[in-house]
Image (cartoon, helix red, strand yellow):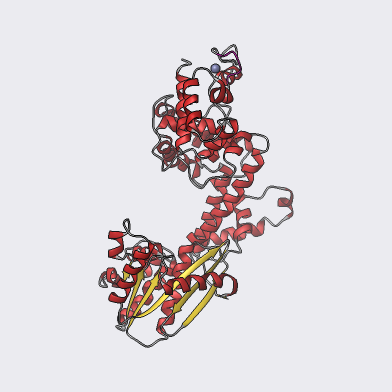
Amino acid sequence: MHINSVVEKTQKFINLFKILAGLNWGIHPKHLRRLYISIIRSRMDYACFLYDNAAKTHLINLDRVQNMAMRLIGGFVKSTAIHVMESELCLVPLHIRRVYLGSKFLFKSKAFSPSPVYTNIVELNANCQNYYWRSKKLPLLITIYRTFNSYNIHSSSKPEMYNLDTWVNYIDLDSVIMHDIPAIVKSKKKCDTKDIKVICSQFINDKYDNYHKIFTDASKKNEDEGIAFFDPQIGSSIKLKLNLNIPIMSAELIAIAECLSYIKSLGGKNFVILSDSKSALQHIKRCSWGYNGVPIAFVILNILKEFHKTNINVKLQWIPAHIGITGNEIVDKLAKEAIVDGHVINYLPSCSENLYRVKQYCFNLWSEYFNERSRTKGIWYRTVQPCLLQKPWFDNSNMSRSDVITSLRLRSGHFPLNSFAFLMKKVPSPNCSECGTIEDVYHILLECVRNEAERKQIEAALPYCFDFASCNSILASPNSAEAKMLYNMVQKGCKRRM
Ligand SMILES: [Zn+2]
């Protein structure tokens, strides 16, 4: 019932998409893709993990909506394999999307204590232990519970931002957290690394002349994080290790928090923590504005508040990484070592930090699915694009809509030419009306007489031989100048067919 009504509701938007995406005109695929995510997929997302066990015949109707939308967004022809469209447009298959959203639900309910929802899930899991479920497919939420329940999570009775005092209103945080160095902002384009290093060292010496300086850094390798701080005045350093697979920014924040605890144990009035993570410093600042960030950022804000009360002056200053500032280089090395031999510390990840791990888990599921499908279908595509992209390649390009669509079709290996129209029983012959041989992607790229002039131009421009293999490697970088020449050639050839 619910699925049918969702399909019905999305249908009118699909019809709208048909109007928005004409053959030679229409909205750019990147905008159409976003529109799909916000107005169609959002409707299918709602509570989707609850009906994952519904009959396949129903679920397939939802898949059809996404497939139809993908064809319209990318201008793909009917014969294009689904996993190819999903990969090109970076739209995750719905069954994996349900795993992600189910996990999000689980972690969100777990992040609040006490949580009646979470108690119910635990109870449901116990009920699913019995004989009946042994031969049946478990409800998705239970499978997710069993997969991720070992992940610890930071829980509280209210969002962290409500645990903050109003103190942030009367401390001028702009003078505590500095995520820029003014002189560098101005001269970054003109200077090389050496000059930046000089400017930077000069700046630190001038501004923090009588300050106790401490450097912090974090490093990540696969699923492990190392964090470290280094105090050149005392010559002491600390190496800590987390094996949680959390975002690098969180690790940088933990490094800063650990460093603040260290400062507490020292005597003195003026301290500056030098970190090369701009995003971490900006995150702390945003949290003070009421943005609900990771819990560790609020820990930092609370420690800063304590220091402010006791008149200890602590600043957080950003410095550029990898330009040869001695303290930064040392702490960078220490953080890398910490991944291997650091002292393991306990840290409870927040909901969003756990979701970072779930995202990777789902991406791996998708990759497995993609590899499996690529064995039988979309073999050409696999040679052009051997693994999944994190975001669509056309998102940040300035290519026109028709160029993007030509590229998507060429990359997928399915183009609306006679060989395809013949399969669809729209034309009597699969042959090119000009050349008399089969008209497919290979033909229009390398044989057709209609675009011979443009082909000659490409052959002259390329430093290597123009053949099917080089077409393949050109299409592997769809934003390159060579690829644009290729699109132009194919488009000219198609125009002359009319
Ligand atoms: Zn031809």
Q: Which of the pair 284/400 is nearer the observer?
A: 400
200 relative to 130 in the view: left or right? left
Q: Is residue 270 visible?
A: yes
**Can residue 311 be found in the magenta stretch?**
no
388 relative to 253 in the view: left or right? right
Q: Which of the pair 111/14 is nearer the observer?
A: 14
Q: Position of residue 183 (x, y in %)?
A: 28, 64
Quadrant holding the N terminus? top right
466 relative to 201 in the view: left or right? right
Res 231 → quadrant: bottom left
- Residue at figure coordinates x 42%, y 69% from the top left: 324
Q: Position of residue 63 (x, y in %)?
A: 56, 36
- Residue at figure coordinates x 40%, y 82% from the top left: 263
Instruction: Classify the position of ligand 1 by quadrant: top left, top right, bottom left or bottom right.
Output: top right
Res 444 → quadrant: top right
Compared to residue 200, the image places residue 460 above or below, namely above
Q: Position of residue 51 (x, y in %)?
A: 57, 44
**Magenta stretch, residue numbers:** 435-439
The overriding secondary structure of the stretch rendered in magenta is loop
Q: Is residue 75 visible?
A: no
